[in-house]
Amino acid sequence: MNNAKVHLAVFLVRAIYAGLHITSKAAFNGGMSAYVFVLYRLVLATLFLAPFAFVLERRTAPPLPFKLCFKIFLLSLFGVTATLIIYSVALDYTSATLSSAIMNSIPVVTFIVAVTLGQETVKLKRLSGIMKVSGVLLCLAGIMEMAFFKGPHIKTLNHHHLLGHGSRETNHPHTHSSRTWVLGTFLMTISNSAWSLWMVLQAPLLKEYPSKLTFTTLQCLFSTFQSFFIALAFERDFSRWKLGLDVGLVSVIYCGIIVTGVAVYLQSWVIDKRGPVFLAMSTPLTLIITIVCSYFLLGELVNLGSVLGGLLMVGGLYSVLWGQRKEQIDKSTPTEVDRKTPLDVKENGATTQV
């Protein structure tokens, strides 16, 4: 029964993230500004998290000195604000399928960042190290393949789209030109890289400020102010700041509450029960769910390049995860030298246990 609950929780997490890609894309197809979308999403996330942080951690949260507060401000600037804005612009230029496919690169990019910062090691003389490097290369190949090869489209048979405004090619100001598609792909890669760096750099700050809920709320609050000024600079048409009773409002509510609140809690619960590797291995589910939903709900033209690139990235993800798992097994398995305890003595050239 416990295993069933864990698997159900994992599926819900992946379905929620698929919904993130679908609803966000639907909002952009409807004409919503990517900059305004990020602002409203962060406002709602802050309003949602703040009461919980106040009630649950107001007595246990440590004092917040100015230096640490400034560190959290900077972490929020590139780890939340910049990441979400770049992601949203990239999604506006590409497709929900591509964005969910590139999500598979986050564990791989996190591994690269950890190696760069000295938190991970690569032993090229061992199978685990070879698998890690192979995973990185597969991931890079997938990104390049999605950027420069679109291939034929799988045409939709459904012409009544619940969330969509028709295919992007005919109804959106940004067409899928080669230049726009390549730019969007690399912007999505930059966004995921910044997100991976953000995850790695959170660890030392959480040691200084261990109140996780307050820490997350502060990042959302800082990012709200940062994204407001960025939106002012890039979105001068204030008619695009208005929220109506449409898919844009649904997407803002969904991303601000369901993604920020429910998904984050479920992820923490799954990691506590089965570990981070188990959660990371479920990442390809998001791609599958997104392809199906974008096909039927958005009428999005899924191209062969995105599917093939996604498969390469899934292969890279599992290769890196397998290498990491193999290293953990090797470390936990004692060698012949390790098995000899200090009580071992040699008698007549032979080793015996006392």
Image: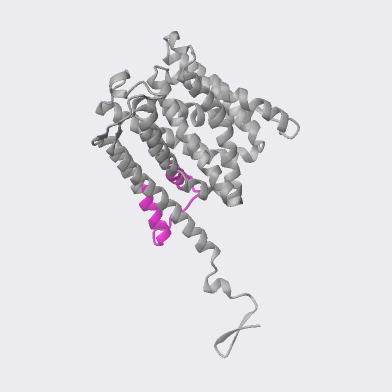
The quadrant in which the C terminus is found is bottom right
Q: In which quarter of the image is residue 70?
A: top right
Q: How is the image coloured?
A: one colour
Which residue reaches farthest left? 152
- Find out whether residue 326 is within the magenta segment: no
Q: Which residue lies furthest to the bottom in this view?
A: 348
x then y, percent, for residue 186 = 34, 33
- Residue, x 54% and y 88% (percent of image)? 349
Q: In this view, does 144 lie to the left or right of 39?
A: left
Farthest-out residue, right: 59
Query: x, y percentage for residue 149?
Result: 25, 37
**Closer to the camera in the image, 188 or 190:** 188
Q: Is residue 122 magenta?
A: yes
| Residue at 54% from the left image edge and 73% from the top image edge | 337
Q: Residue at x 58, y 34 (%)?
A: 262
Say if residue 207 shows up in the picture: yes
Residue 269 in the image, given as x and y percentages of width and height: 60, 43
Q: Position of residue 91 (x, y in %)?
A: 38, 28
> In the rendered structure, which segment of residues is drawn in magenta?
107-136
Image vertical order of residue 75 relative to residue 123, above or below: above
User: Is residue 203 visible to the viewer in this orientation of the structure?
Assistant: no
Residue at x 45% of width, y 25% of height: 85
- Foreground pick, 238 / 122: 238
Q: Quadrant of residue 76?
A: top right
